[in-house]
Amino acid sequence: MGLAIFVLFVWLIIIQCQLNKLSDTVNKNTIKNLYPETMYENSQPAEQNDVPAPSVSDNETNEITDNNLQTVSDEQLPKTKFLDFETTFLGNIFNKIGAIALVISCIVFIKIISPYVIFTPAMKISLGYIAAIILIISGCKMTDEKMKGYKESLLGTGFSVAFITTYCASALFHLFNPLLSTVLAILILGTVYYVADKQKTLSMIIIALIAGYINPIFINAHASNEFLFGYYIFLNLLSVIYVYRNPHRDYINFVNLSLTFIILSCILLFQESTINILYPLILWLVYLIYDVLRKEKISSDNIKDNILNWINLGILTLLTLLIFKEQKIYAGSLVLFVGLLYAGLVVRYVKQKTVSYKPYLYSSLILLLIGTYLSLDGIWRIGLLSLESLAISAAAFRYNLNYLCKWSFSFLFAVITVVLCSENVVYFNNIQEYTPIFNIRTAYFIFPLISAFISYKLLLKSNNSELNKIIELFRFLLISFVYLYFVFEINSLIYKYCSKLFDKDFVSLMIVSILGFKYASQMKSIGNKAELKLFDIGAYLTGLISLNTLLVAGFEYVPIQHFLPVINIRFVAFLTAIVCSALFARWTKLDAFKYLAVILGFVLVHVETRDFINAGIISNIDYLLTVMWLVYSGIITTIGIFKNKKYLKITGIWISIAAILRIFIYDLVDTDMIYKLVAFMTLGAVLMIISYFYNKYNNTVQK
């Protein structure tokens, strides 16, 4: 415990030193503005500028101050680094270390004389309070501004001794019962805030915060949750009153509220206990009243000025969820009730037209979304969220409130998440119970589809160029709903009715990939119109994933019954992939997609020929695979020569090289002469034709 107290004092010293350094810096800058010629060694003499230097007497020099700034003489001004070092140690650190040393020396003195003089616990506690009172009174008596740092050390030490003495009287000596100890701690805490407000010092607030949060743990280790929450509400109330009188210290409220939430949430989580919901509501109400009163002075939509409101709202929501973990409908109802209160504030400020109402409007919309999600379930949740999104879009259109469009989009985006997480949407648990179109999936999708469509049409009708991006986002949501619905419906149809006809997994992947490419093309269109790079990236990724899915599914395709070249589902899949690659090459202007299209064609030729050979329709035609390689390379190379397409010529050359290597390494081993003859004749004919066309037409084509 002694070590903890020592660390606490060291921390206070460090903070105080930093504050004093900041004060010294402000002081020097102020004097620098008053007398710039004294701050620079290289500045020109006053005679050269024909401007007389300001004459300052010794007495006037010592009176150069700015409100609470320390006195600095002209002779000291150039010695900035030495001044900082001197002020830090002699003016700040030494008096704080000295105060701590005196407290420790008193404790050591009592221990030394204890064998000779009997000190009862009551006497020790009395001496502690007497020492605290002496230090506090001594600090309050110092009115000289130059002694401000020294005064803060005395006051800080005095109040720290008072807190520690109260702890010892309760926890160590058991002189005070928990109730009396708590009352004393609250009185000391209130006094600290009062002195901090009067003396305008941050040190007292730091002491009050630390001691305030530690006291209930030390004084009453077995306190109930209601007691702790009530105590911390009181602590936050003191903080709010102090910050209201000192607005530049608003960060104290952030620290206080965050610490309260962390402590109480840990209690609720790890002790598996609960508290009355009135306590979180009171805490929220304290900060809401403070925010309302503050807005009467400062009205701003700036996020920084309204962050306390968001933190307060978030903490109330999280504590509500922790308290009603198993009763979400109660949590949702409470959240909706709080949202109505925020809506009431919005109405009030809209009528006044003097205070910004947007932060409270945003708060009410967030609570409406959360409350709807918690209060309802299933189709009711999706339907109401969709209706709320449509209502927000209508309000944005009717009153020309463009910023509401983003909230409408957020509601619809939340609906997508809810729909995808619902049961019997992606897959039916029992496929035999599935009925096309007339099923729960259609009911889940119909409400957001209608909402997205009407919102899109309303905003499109507004003819507002500022809404172009958000209009395209609504179109994206509308397309997403349609795409997801068709994907899930087609999958269910295939799995129920077509599983015996062909490979249902392959067909499902193929259809999803084709629809995925269409979805990617729509995303690309939206990205171009809205000038959103994110949609361009999403379109490329979706297209590549679709192409990869098609490639993998087609390569691993195994015919269920008799194989027919070209007339099979895999051929359609690869042909679609080739078309996709060609279109992506046109979009992106990247040659990589052109090479991909040619390679996909080669893979298609290879797998179709392989399965034709494996089907055994014609025996002993293993060489046909190499022949088809050569035919394919010859076709694309010839086209590349006539069209002057570099990617076709290069790919054809490499496929020809692969075919040549296959002939000499694989086809010539253990094959009849007739097969060798066919292989070499094909190789020679293809290569000669390619070379003939290249030499005859290449120069003409290039010209």
Image (cartoon, rainbow, N blue to C red):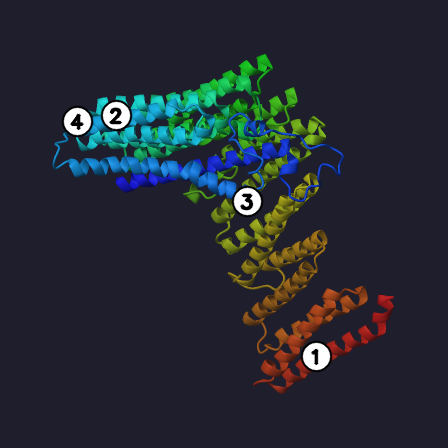
**Which of pointers 3 and 2 lies earlier in the amino acid sequence?**
2
Mark 3–mark 2 distance (CA, rounded to whole Å) = 80 Å
Q: Nearer the viewer, residue 603 or 305?
A: 305
Residue at the spot x=47%, y=35% of the render? Answer: 19
**646 to the left or right of 257:** right
- Which amino acid, by three-letter code, is at mark 2? Ile
The image quadrant that residue 59 belongs to is top right
Tell me the element at label 4.
helix
Residue 15 at least partly seen: no
- Which amino acid, by three-letter code, is at mark 3? Val
- Which amino acid, by three-letter code, is at mark 4? Ala
Q: Nearer the viewer, residue 127 or 625?
A: 127
Q: Nearer the viewer, residue 574 or 82?
A: 82
Tell me the element at label 2.
helix
**38 to the left or right of 336:** right
Q: Nearer the viewer, residue 631 or 696?
A: 696
Q: Quadrant of the N terminus?
A: top left
Mark 2–mark 4 distance (CA, rounded to whole Å) = 12 Å
Other residues around mark 4 within 10 Å, as few (<14) / some (14–19) / many (≥20): few
Q: Where is residue 595 shown, x and y percent of the image?
A: 68, 63
Residue at the spot x=37%, y=34% of the render? Answer: 262
Q: Which residue is mark 2?
A: 130
**Which of pointers 1 and 3 lies earlier in the amino acid sequence?**
3
**Which of pointers 4 and 3 lies earlier in the amino acid sequence?**
4
Residue 683: image tag: 1
Residue 341 at least partly seen: yes
Mark closer to the observer (4, 3): 4
Tell me the element at label 1.
helix
Q: Where is residue 138 shown, x and y percent of the image?
A: 35, 25
Other residues around mark 3 within 10 Å, as few (<14) / some (14–19) / many (≥20): some
Q: Which residue is mark 4?
A: 122
